Amino acid sequence: NTGSTEPAPDLKLAVFDFDGTVVDSRRRIVTAAVRAFDDCSLPRPTEQNVLNQVGLSLYDVMLNLLGRDDHEAVMRLVDRYREHYRSMRIDGHLKPWPIAGVLDAMRDLRARGVLLGIATGKSRRGLNHAVDDLLIRELFATLKSSDDGPGKPAPAILLDAMDEAGTDAANTVMIGDTTWDMLMAANAGVRALGVTFGYHSSEELRSAGAFDVLDDYGRLAEVLSTQFTVPPREMPTDLSPWE
């Protein structure tokens, strides 16, 4: 509950993170990162260290994993990571799969008249490939990547998404699996909903400002209704009573 006597705002825009929120891509991310460090003859990061960085821009991920401020070394790692990730995408190796129920949940929100967006630390090229591979581009009113502004937890890409969709913070929700998503939302004045399918724990998400944490996308509209007025589903008008 919002804890206020004021009417709940109408939900106009739901912005999703991508990796760990829409797709499970951990195997491809970890493999590309480890191979990048191998190429540069650097000690391999652990799987957990890599996953802890997911959600940040790729430059910041590699900077944190390297552990020292060395721009040239970071850029070599970024280039090698991108090359390995690209090769795996072309070969279909370790293909990311949609999180259970996410596509149905997105289509349900669209049927309720809610606009959808993506705000991700992926590059624009990577995001474009991903949404096209999943055949879901038509679901989104706005797609924002690390090429569109400072990375999370800076609010720039989320603010741009709202501007592009023509809505404001009171009528927007951010849905993500990391504390970076929750903090970006807080910095933009947007309510944030955590999901447990990705890389940070429920406790971490709540501590970073999530109003709730979801472990089943089938409950998405129900959970959102605690914060917003969620429109009813729009029923088809071209069906006979028997269909």
Image (spheres, helix red, strand yellow):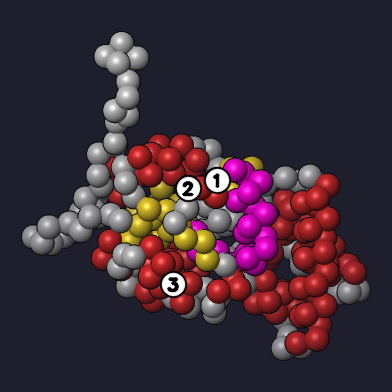
Q: Is residue 71 above or below residue 126?
A: below
Q: Where residue 136 is drawn, which disc sits there?
A: 1
Q: Earlier in the sequence, mark 3 or mark 2?
A: 2
Query: Label 2 crowding class (10 Å Cα cut-off): few <14, some 14-19, many 20+?
Result: some
The residue positioned 33% from the left and 61% from the top of the image is 172
Residues marked 1 and 2 touching at CB (< 8 Å): yes
**Along the horizontal axis of the image, is 61 left or right of 226?**
right
Where's the C terminus, which quadrant? top left
> Which residue does the numbered mark 3 point to in the structure image?
160
Q: Secondary structure at mark 2?
A: helix
Residues marked 3 and 2 touching at CB (< 8 Å): no
Q: Where residue 34 is drawn, which disc sits there?
A: none
The residue positioned 46% from the left and 77% from the top of the image is 156
The residue positioned 31% from the left and 65% from the top of the image is 167
Where's the N terminus, which quadrant? bottom left
Q: Secondary structure at mark 1?
A: loop
Residue 174 image offset from top left, x and y in percent: 40, 60
User: Taking the image as drawn, is residue 74 in sight?
Assistant: yes
* Magenta stretch encompasses residue 159: no
Query: Label 3 crowding class (10 Å Cα cut-off): few <14, some 14-19, many 20+?
Result: some
